[in-house]
Image (spheres, rainbow, N blue to C red):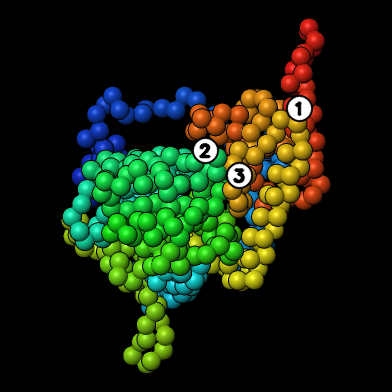
Amino acid sequence: MPFIPHTKEEVAAMLAVIGVERIDDLFDEIPPDLVVTDLPNLPPALSEMEIGRLMQQRSREDGQPLCFIGAGAYEHHIPAAVWQIAGRGEFYSAYTPYQAEASQGTLQVLYEFQSMMTALTGLDVSNASLYDGASALAEAVLMAVRCHRKPRPRRVLVPRALHPAYRRTLYTIVGQQDIELLEIPFDRTGGHTALDQLDALENREFTALVINQPNFFGVLEEVDALTDWAHQRDSLVIGVVNPVALALLSPPGEWGEQGADIACGEAQPLGMPLASGGPYAGFLCCRQPLVRQLPGRITGRTLDQAGKPGFTLTLQAREQHIRRAKATSNICTNQGLLVTAATIHTALLGAEGLERVAKACHANTARLSDLLCEIPGVEPLFDRPVFHEKALRLPAPTADLLRSLAAHNILGGFDLGPDYPELDSGLLVCATEMRTEEEMTTYAQKLARIITIRTQAPCPGAPRL
């Protein structure tokens, strides 16, 4: 919708009705030293054509490198139909569907998204969406603390093998709310959360245990044993999952004897481009007894007076609708457009298509790992099964190798050193269904040459890559 500015006469008329002379008078409560009076670094105005040319030039500077980075955001194939449909005006510009009678299409899409998420996670209820996977986990932890019936310390066990960005977001949101986050080390051989690490906490009560499957290193966790361990201690289980991986792995609702209580994750793999890091969308699911504490929006299906099916927002336990003290969250929006894309994407693939994508990703990551481990000095960091990601140890500083690969237009992976100093020279690589055998071979050849040059004693005055 184009923006139509007011004329000077219209602005003057509105100010006269309000009783002020200037628009700035409406903001006189702002201290003068905080007021920005000019923008000295703003370039001169450009025409639409000049702006278009500039943006095209900037985008071409980024190039189209081969991407072997996963680490929570993945380059998957997105069918053209996904954003052709999501970009229609009915979806693209739709506002929050408060008026059910005028928003049946949007509400049905949200309902279908919820249905797909419950099918993938094996749980009973899903909300309409959250900002991203990290904030979804924070909401899941707050939800677990509210749901726990027995009085006990507000303590949640968080594996160190959880995504570093998720852990930082969790500490930012939850750490200030009198909730202790106790970090659990990972096994240095397998890269997983071992039960003996948890047994050391036998005498410390906790509210919930977070289990990520697969974990940040791509390693598959012993979810059944971990879930039963937590439930035997009257604690809740929060599963952090990848929706594509769930096409092959057991869903959180089937972990252990009772299943996880809450599941959350990032929906980006379902029809959302990398887009420089966002926007993405999170999902949050739970068992039916916990539904009253599920934050965000929930779309329900009902029948109207004529007996026809219809959709409406339900169980809106947010501060916009009830007293703030009783609100489950301060979430004030959802990622409706991204959820629309995720719903269309998942519907187009279906269960069989999603499974084929997951198998292709697993096969490509295994193939890439094999190619890279043929290079002298490159070896796996861990010895357990993986999905999507593989952690490798390199014979030279990871950051230096990645810079050299970038010069060859290859994004070689995620440097583990800054977030895991104990894994210095560690590299996390990923190959989705988008990568071809030729591209993976090219990556291995470039990396082999760079490692050879860097590990050999340089001749005096010889340039380094």
- Which mark sits nearer the N-terminus, 1 or 2? 2
Q: Nearer the viewer, mark 1 or mark 2?
A: 2
Q: Mark 2 points at which residue?
A: 188
Number of the label disc, if any, that sits on residue 383? 3
Q: Residue 320 location in percent, x, y?
A: 26, 60
Q: Which quadrant, please, contains the C terminus?
A: top right
Q: In which quarter of the image is residue 80?
A: bottom right
Q: Is mark 1 on a helix, strand or loop?
A: helix
Q: State the residue at coordinates (60%, 71%).
A: 351
Toward the top, the furthest residue is 460
Q: State the residue at coordinates (37%, 27%).
A: 37
Q: Are marks 1 and 3 in contact (CB under 8 Å)?
A: no
For the residues labelled 1 and 3, the Cα–Cα distance comes to 26 Å
Amino acid at the residue labelled 2: Arg
Q: State the residue at coordinates (26%, 60%).
A: 147
Which residue occupies the foreground of this view, 126 or 237? 237
Q: Name the residue under label 1.
A: 450
- Which mark sits nearer the N-terminus, 1 or 3? 3
Q: Residue 242 location in percent, x, y?
A: 53, 56
Q: Can residue 109 be seen in this view?
A: no
Which residue occupies the foreground of this view, 222 or 56? 222
Which residue occupies the foreground of this view, 235 or 311? 235
Amino acid at the residue labelled 1: Ile
Q: Which of marks 1 and 3 is in front?
A: 3
Amino acid at the residue labelled 3: Asp
Q: Residue 319 location in percent, x, y?
A: 24, 58
Which residue occupies the foreground of this view, 77 or 12? 77
Q: In which quarter of the image is residue 311?
A: bottom left
Rendered view: 96 above or below 265: below
Q: Residues within 10 Å of mark 1 (few under 14, many from 20)?
A: some
Q: Are marks 2 and 3 in contact (CB under 8 Å)?
A: no
